[in-house]
Image (tube, helix red, strand yellow):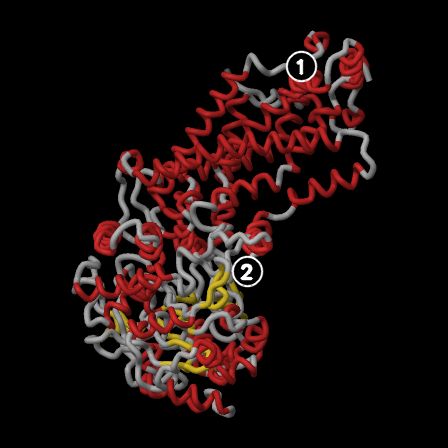
Amino acid sequence: MTTEQITSVAERPDPTASVAPARAANRPRVSMTARRHRAFYMFTSPWIIGFLLLTIAPMAYALWLSLTTFDGLSPNWRFVGLDNYRELLSDPVTWDALGRAGLFAVTSVPLSILAGLALAVLVNRPLRARGLFRTLLYLPAVVPPVGAGLAFKQLFDQNSGAANGVLNLFGIDALGWLADPYARYVLLMTVLWTAGNIMIISLAGLQDVPRELHEAARVDGASAWRTFRSITVPLLSPVLLFQTVTGVIASVQTIMPLLLAPDGTTAGVTLVPQSNYLYMMHVFAQYFAIGRYGYASALLWVLFVLILVVTGLIFRFTSGAVFYNVDPEAKK
Amino acid sequence: MRSHAGDPPTRRRFLALSAGGAVAGATALSGCALQVSTGVSGSGQTVTVMVKPGEITPDDVKQARKDLGIKIILVKYDITKLIAMMTTGSPPDLVRGAGAVDAPYFAARDLMEDLDPYFARSTVLRPADLDPVNDLWRYDGRTQGKGPRYGMAKDFSQDSMYWYNTSLFDKAGVDYPPETEPVTYEEWLENAKRLTRRRNGQTTVFGGSYNGLMKSSLLASLTAAAGGSLFTDDYSRVDFTTPEARKALGWYIEYCRTKVGPSPIQPDPNAWDGPTYQASRMAMSNSGYWLGGMIGTDRKLAKVSRLAPAPVFGQGPRISPCQSGTGLWMPKKARHKDAAWRVFEWFFGEAPARARASGGWGIPTLKSLRPLMPAQQEYQKRTLQVQDAELRHFSVISFTPYATADALDALFNQVAPAAMTGGISVDTLAGRLNSAMNEQLERGKEQVG
């Protein structure tokens, strides 16, 4: 339907006018643009109301809590201004947990992106049973984290786990995988285990790379590595940027160390080995084990601001390295 | 600029409307939250009970409907959910808790209903019939074990006792502990070392497990067994540097360091002793009478299992406390108190109580139900004999009202592993624990007022 047709429909006499001419005369004229705006807002309002109710309101509530000594049950909590923020700046446990979370992000994110990309390249090749491999490699990504945590705990248990069974076969003494200093490696393995997520997105990106570019490179005598480096990676760069940003956010928010912890009780969060005691573990402990809702809310707000800053920095420093394959005509 | 009915909403107006919608939604949700428990007084009421899975079964719920005409809605126990329900003014009508550590905390915050008037009227739960363990649920504003009753234990054990596997003692050539006389904690640890079996860096048999139910109540019990008190007289501070607390702490750290059993630095993936003990991979398990419920289901295991008295420290008194006393309490703002009390009476004094008493998963908390404890099999008779003798040494160890056991446990877990691995001395640990825990207690004291 063209614009002219739409206008003519809009201007067609109202068939009800003869029934209720006075009402029709009083009704304000609604332009098509107004109707479209209204439709837009009607369709988006459930999300916006949900966003205000389930994101903005809890964040505002957490901001208020962060300025108090509220512990959930005690009657005499009070407003303390920025005291919780001052305390966290001088709390060595907070800084250590934040440092470990940063270290975890800078190791786990590149490793998982590399693993996912390698798998994507592998299953993008014309292999026999390629669909089966893709499914099998993606499968761990759909296992709920709680199930994965339980499986890893059993697998890496010092006294009855299969990992030490394998070491024993080679005459190597069993290791305490779930304790320091090995616990960090088990945590990394849980991240790599779900690299299927990244593989799927990278695979979609790979299939979007124009085949003629690869053919041209081959004609010019470029090696496979050179083709990958100079054609595939630049064209995948938006996908890689997306994975980096979401990966960093997910890694600083991970609660997997808790799922690997030996004690399932609330207080057990503090039994997470020190190398895995990341920022979110500290937040969890302050909220649910120690009951300092105010302090824990301050920790969360600081994390929120840090994530915003880090995300901004990533965009800033990668702006020149990301290649967007945009059709210039589409902008007109 | 005035807006007209037919105009599209401006962004500002739209956001204002959305915010209004959000507030209306929040109010509606809050209204829903207030309707968790509904009904009218008397039979036909609905009572909300917050318990852990299995503490009240769906069959119990059906039975309650039949016996009492009261509908029970079960809510899974979760402290965060409890806080949310309390703060929105719609608490459950009954809540599970561990009397040993929860009663002073909640009572000091004026969140619990004084149940004395109900007990005084009850023909099912007569005060004279209550086992002394129920005193864990009493608090007079200063001392646990005195004052009004705020709850009741469903069953109990003396949690410093331990079970041992005679076949593992035989294999290691270690003498069995005496039936009714306690060994010292030092002897217990020595036995655990001799019973431990290791191969290729793996522990094939744990000599013994000794972790109590919660770290803070374990340490309070151990300190009491050494003749002291972990808390100061007004319960506003801990002191791990007193000779008795230092002795208790030193013993537990030594237990962890020697790795004779599960500990924070050598966790059991099952998070409790049951499966490891049942698999004959643990020679001694620090569990009270309640573990007999599991042992009794395995005839072979029952044949080689013995219950032993709580150990003592050389010069300390002989005590055998209950570290939990798990039961139910009624929030002060409960909506259906009379109906909740009827469920309370039924749960603690009628069919469910009788079923628990005969199940062997704990000692009944009404003296009149004691004859129902399982005593048909030989191993049951032997266990009961040890348990009966141990009851003479039952004692209540008061806990602080200024912090939850979870909070103190969390702080212990944060600080103590360094000492368990030899990174810091026990004296340094004692100082750090004092500092971390007293800070938490100070905050709690300020908030209780």
Amino acid of disc 1: Ser
Query: Front-most of B126 and B318?
Result: B318
Q: How many marks?
A: 2
- Note whether A217 is above or below B269 in the view shown: above
| Residue depicted at x 18% and y 59% | B241
Residue B416 image position (x, y, % from top left): 32, 54
| Relative depth, front residue between B314 and A134 | B314
Residue at 68% in and 13% down = A326
Q: Which mark is residue A160?
A: 2
Q: What residue is shown with label 1?
A: A230
Label 2, residues with CA under 10 Å away: few <14, some 14-19, many ≥20:
some
Q: Is residue B449 visible?
A: no
Using the image, determine if residue A141 lies above or below residue A198.
Answer: below
Where residue A172 appears, as percent x and y from the top left, is 53, 52
Question: Which chain does the numbered disc 2 sit on?
Answer: A
The image quadrant that residue A281 belongs to is: top left
Q: Nearer the viewer, residue A241 or A306?
A: A241
Residue at mark 1 to residue at mark 2: CA–CA distance: 48 Å
> The numbered mark 1 sits on a residue in which chain?
A
